Image (tube, helix red, strand yellow):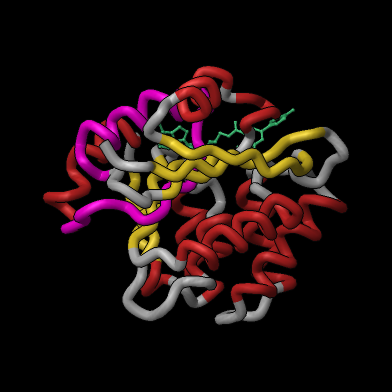
Amino acid sequence: TRTSRPQRILKAVQRKATVGDPQSVITAIDHFCRHREWAMNVGDEKGSILDSVVSEVSPVTVLELGTYCGYSTVRIARLLPPGACVITLEFNPDYAAIARQVIQWSGLEDKVQLVEGASGDWIPWMKEHFGVQAFDLVFLDHWKERYLPDTKLLEECGLIQKGTVLLADNVICPGTPDYLEYVRNSPRYNSHYYRSHLEYTKAEDGLEKSVFLGY
Ligand SMILES: Cc1ncnc2c1ncn2[C@@H]1O[C@H](/C=C/CNC(=O)c2cc(-c3ccc(F)cc3)cc(O)c2O)C[C@H]1O
Ligand SMILES: [Mg+2]
């Protein structure tokens, strides 16, 4: 049977990228998705904004919701200092299998904990299972209707504390209206919209950065 798009993305990485060189993995995926087949990676333009937020926060523990092929996992992990790590949740086993190989090709497996499962099932276990106190940075890029319930769940589980930064992809396209309304109107968040474009296209999209101000 035909290969899947994630499998074709992995092939492009194995053909064009250098093992142990995260930037070459990012470049290979962006080239493939711009010139061969579009895919829902955060992409190069929004990826640069993600990079600047990661550098500014210099997080020790990062949570990523929605690994897909691991493109943004690699973007985040390549900027983390020794001892810092990103826990990334992916409930599709085929995507998780591809992402593991992409992360391995980039040589960043020591900075990444890929967990196969649904965010709603795993968030309550983060403290106990991974010894996480609170997340310094959360990158939301999974199902758009899960952004708000998972944010509330993270709050309830004490995994969001004063200073935690939430960075949400696709707040315009496909859009996350209930999440946006929540973080922009809540007195407990300071929100900023980074205007950009939907990956590999001219359509508008952007990232919303929301800093938790504490209770
Ligand atoms: C609840 C939960 N737990 C764990 N993993 C979860 C999960 N919900 C989804 N996931 C996993 O994240 C990934 C899903 C991401 C959803 N992202 C999207 O649907 C998405 C869609 C578009 C888009 C824009 C315009 C168009 F015309 C078409 C598509 C662009 C993007 O950047 C996206 O992230 C893969 C999935 O298995
Ligand atoms: Mg996205």
Q: Is residue 91 left or right of residue 34?
A: left
Which is more toward the observer, 125 or 187? 187
Report the label total.
Answer: 0
| Ligand 1: quadrant of the figure | top right
Residue 56's spot in the image, x, y percent? Answer: 53, 64
Which is more toward the observer, 207 or 76? 207
Residue beneath the point at 39% across and 70% down = 111
User: Quadrant where the C terminus lies?
Assistant: top left
Residue beneath the point at 67% across and 61% down = 11
Residue 50's spot in the image, x, y percent? Answer: 60, 55
Q: Is residue 2 visible?
A: no
Which is more toward the observer, 162 or 50? 162
Residue 43's spot in the image, x, y percent? Answer: 70, 52
Asked if residue 177 is among those painted magenta in the image, a careful observer would answer no
Q: Is residue 185 above or below residue 205?
A: above
Q: Is residue 110 left or right of residue 58?
A: left
Residue 106's spot in the image, x, y percent? Answer: 55, 73
User: Quadrant where the N terminus lies?
Assistant: top right
Q: Which residues are magenta?
A: 131-159
Q: Is residue 188 above or below residue 37?
A: above
Which is more toward the observer, 98 or 127? 127
Tell me where residue 169 sits by quadrant: top right
Q: Is residue 74 visible?
A: yes
Q: Is residue 56 left or right of residue 15?
A: left
